[in-house]
Image (cartoon, helix red, strand yellow):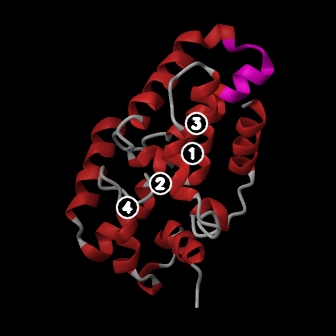
């Protein structure tokens, strides 16, 4: 049998698998905005196979915003924005992007407080958000990360399946800083 991480990965790339996909299982990963993984392509494939109203609503939003073209991912996730923030800081040019960084941190904090899925669907985003918010003086509790405490929790995520070690380093860095 497939591990949960393998199933999530297959769901993530399901638009290329057509009728071979288990669309009912894939729909378990539908986000509040109606998308599947914030991916227009996967959401469109699900709409084609299941005529899902949430996917239709999401795709209408994408078309209204972008017209005839669609980005690969929409909306750009907090994880990507936090990675950009981190890279700008590492390069030492963050002072030129203060407003954008503050906007990213404030948006992340607004999502952190109510425990929104954008942050807490995966351990990589949660760990990076925790570390960066904490390093910028935001009052965030590590209690929110307790959902990832189970030993197999990391492997049973898309990021774990793809062997994303970055989130592990985020957690280690934060522990060393304490």
Circles 2 and 1, Cβ within 8 Å, touching? The answer is yes
Tell me if residue 143 can be seen.
yes
Depth check: give the residue in front, 58 or 150: 150
- Residue drawn at x 65%, y 63% as measured from the top left: 160
Depth check: give the residue in front, 124 or 68: 124
Q: Quadrant of the C terminus?
A: top right
Q: Which residues are magenta?
A: 86-94
Q: Which residue is under mark 1?
A: 125
**SS at circle 2:** loop
- Residue drawn at x 56%, y 57% as measured from the top left: 148
Nearer-N-terminus badge (4/2): 4
Q: Chief secondary structure of the magenta span?
A: helix
Between the residue at mark 3 and the residue at mark 4, the CA separation in whole angstroms equals 29 Å
Between the residue at mark 3 and the residue at mark 1, the CA separation in whole angstroms equals 8 Å
Q: Which mark is residue 142?
A: none
Depth check: give the residue in front, 130 or 90: 130
Tell me if residue 71 can be seen.
no
Q: Which residue is under mark 2?
A: 121
Nearer-N-terminus badge (3/1): 1
Question: Is 93 contained in the magenta span?
Answer: yes
Please say if 124 is above or below 6: above
Left or right? Give the position of 176 relative to 8. Answer: right
Circles 1 and 4, Cβ within 8 Å, touching? The answer is no
Could you tell me residue 84's position as x and y percent? 64, 30
């Amino acid at each position: 049998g497939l591990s949960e991480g393998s199933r999530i990965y297959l769901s993530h790339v399901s638009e290329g698998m057509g009728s071979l996909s288990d669309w009912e299982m894939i729909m378990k990963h539908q986000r509040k905005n109606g998308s599947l993984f914030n991916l227009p392509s996967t959401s469109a494939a699900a709409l084609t196979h299941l005529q899902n109203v949430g996917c239709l609503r999401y795709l209408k939003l994408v078309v209204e915003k972008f017209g005839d073209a669609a980005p690969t991912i929409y909306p750009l996730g907090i994880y990507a924005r936090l990675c950009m923030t981190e890279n700008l800081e590492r390069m030492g040019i963050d002072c030129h992007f203060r407003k954008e960084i503050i906007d990213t941190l404030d948006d992340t904090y607004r999502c952190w407080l109510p425990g929104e899925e954008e942050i807490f669907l995966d351990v990589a985003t949660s760990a990076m958000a925790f570390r960066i918010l904490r390093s910028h003086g935001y009052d965030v509790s590590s209690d929110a990360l307790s959902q990832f405490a189970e030993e197999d929790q990391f492997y049973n995520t898309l990021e774990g399946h793809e062997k994303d070690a970055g989130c592990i380093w985020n957690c280690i860095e934060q522990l060393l800083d304490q």
